[in-house]
Image: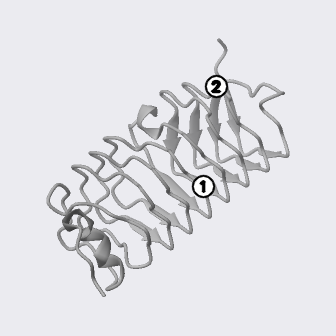
Amino acid sequence: MENNFIENKTFEKTNFSEKEISFGEYENCKFTYCNFADVNLNNFVFIECEFISCNFSNAKIKNTALKDVKFRNCKLLGLNFSSCDSFLLSIYFEDSHLNLASFYKLDLKGIEFKNCNLQEVDFTKADLTSSTFENCDLNRAVFVNTILEKSDFRNAYNYSFDPDINRIKKAKFSASGVLGLLDKYNVLIE
């Protein structure tokens, strides 16, 4: 398979589910209103790329390199980010839907999620040190043996996790949101 190098290119309103995307390395490219649903992106490389209003639902991203990649207003349902190439992994999400995605065991120090739907996302064993969850819905998100030290949950909502099995030292919570840390005790707070 030929490995192409594509640089400084803009892709708009392209349906890669119908028109095959060229295999290779994409650097400083911008994708707007593109469809990657169910597309095989295994072993692709994306460096300093931006995806705006794109659909990645159920795309295959095994060994895909995402280095300084931004997703804005994207649909990323069911993506298994834990299968990506973890070397220099750097991703940012804004106004995006990531329901049922997996970040299992990933080093995501400093990751930012802004205005994202993160329902039922798996953060098991991930390192989310100094991460930000600004105005994010974390309903039924899974945090088990997750490093959440210095993370900011002050504007997040619907989260529930056990502080005894996660590292939360110096994490930030709002007064109303901290109740999600007490769910395991099945207490009523009025």
For the image, the number of numbered tags is 2
Specify whether 67 is left or right of 164. right
Where 76 falls versus 112 (above or below)? above
Q: Where is residue 162 in the image (x, y as percent from the top left)?
A: 22, 60
Q: Where is residue 138 in the image (x, y as percent from the top left)?
A: 45, 62
Where 185 falls versus 6 (above or below)? below
* The N terminus: image quadrant: top right
Residue sitting at x 64%, y 40%: 57
Amino acid under disc 1:
His
- Badge nearest the viewer, 1 or 2: 1
Q: Where is residue 37 in the image (x, y as percent from the top left)?
A: 70, 36
Residue topped by disc 1 = 97
Q: Where is residue 178 in the image (x, y as percent from the top left)?
A: 29, 77
Residue topped by disc 2 = 40
Residue sitting at x 31%, y 86%: 175
* The C terminus: image quadrant: bottom left
CA–CA distance between discs 1 and 2? 20 Å
Q: Which of 166 and 17 is in front in this view?
A: 166
Specify whether 176 is left or right of 76. left
Q: Quadrant of residue 158?
A: bottom left
Residue sitting at x 49%, y 44%: 101
Q: In which quarter of the image is residue 171?
A: bottom left
| Crowd class of label 1 (few under 14; some 14 to 19; many from 20; radius 10 Å) | many
Structure colour scheme = one colour
Q: Do the residues labelled 1 and 2 touch (CB within 8 Å)?
A: no
Q: Nearer the viewer, residue 145 or 62?
A: 145
